[in-house]
Amino acid sequence: MPLPVLWILFILLALIHLFTCYRDLTRLRDGTKSLLLLFLAALYLCGARHFRPMVLAALLLGCLGDTLLIWGERGSAYQLQFFGGAAAFALGHLAYLAALCSIAPPLAAPAFLIPAFGLMLLGPALLFLKIRHGIPALFRYPSMLYGVIIALMAALALQFLYCTRTLPSLLIGIGMLCFVLSDSLLTYCMFGKQQKTPGLYGTVMLFYILAQGLLTEGFSLLP
């Protein structure tokens, strides 16, 4: 199937999924969620100028994480499924980190990387302090580690943008920032807000889809 057609189908699927999120159509929402990352994996396989296995691994791990969270909402072992989903997302972030390290030295600009890491860590750290009492004890330390991984991933992407200043690095940088925002909103939605609203969950998915889509296209354009 031609690449533009795949992108059109993905955008249509994303719009349908966001509509189901904001309208709280649970069954259709769950049915479309796992397909999003599978479409992006196919787009990366078909469109990557230089195939990087870690990027494909990150997309597939994201699909696994989405699926585990969907099953967790329906099953009795919610905490186990949530932990498994979070672990899959964390491994996906590490795969993105590995892909970034393969194209840009991690310490190419330490004077930029260290402050960027501190800045990216500030938001998750403040959020953790605000909602820590609402996070089950089993998840507190893993959530702290997860925040560090996200901050490092975003900081490396920003360093890559700072050093190269190309369209692919811009897409990757914006995508990583969207990831920080979507994961922070998801954490707040799950542990910090008493009432779960469709609008908030829809906003989480909006930034999540933007993050994964921008990263897919950014890595696809890299030589």
Image: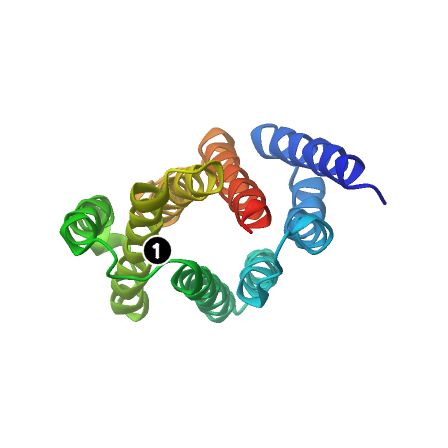
| Residue shown at the point (17%, 56%) measured from the top left | 110
Q: Nearer the viewer, residue 25 or 84?
A: 84
Classify 70 as above or below 1. Answer: below
- Colour convention of the picture: rainbow
- Asked if residue 186 is positioned above or below residue 65 in the image, the reply reads above
User: The residue under label 1 is which amino acid type?
Assistant: Met
Q: Position of residue 153 (x, y in %)?
A: 34, 55
Quarter that holds the N terminus: top right
x, y percent for residue 111: 14, 51
Q: Is 95 positioned to the left or the right of 21 in the image?
A: left
Outermost residue, right direction?
A: 1
Q: Tell me if 60 is positioned left or right of 133 in this view.
A: right
Residue 9 % position (x, y) = 76, 36
Would residue 75 be seen by someone viewing this image from the given angle?
Answer: no
Write down the residue under mark 1. Answer: 153
Q: Residue drawn 55% across and 58% down?
A: 62
Tally of numbered tags: 1
Residue at the (72%, 48%) spot, across then down: 31
Dot 1: within a 10 Å radius of its alpha carbon, few (fewer than 14), some, or many (20 or more) residues? many
Residue 220 makes an appearance in the image: yes
**Circle 1 SS class:** helix
* Residue 72, picture quadrant: bottom right
The answer to whether residue 105 is left or right of residue 179 is left
Residue 116 in picture, x, y percent from top left? 20, 47
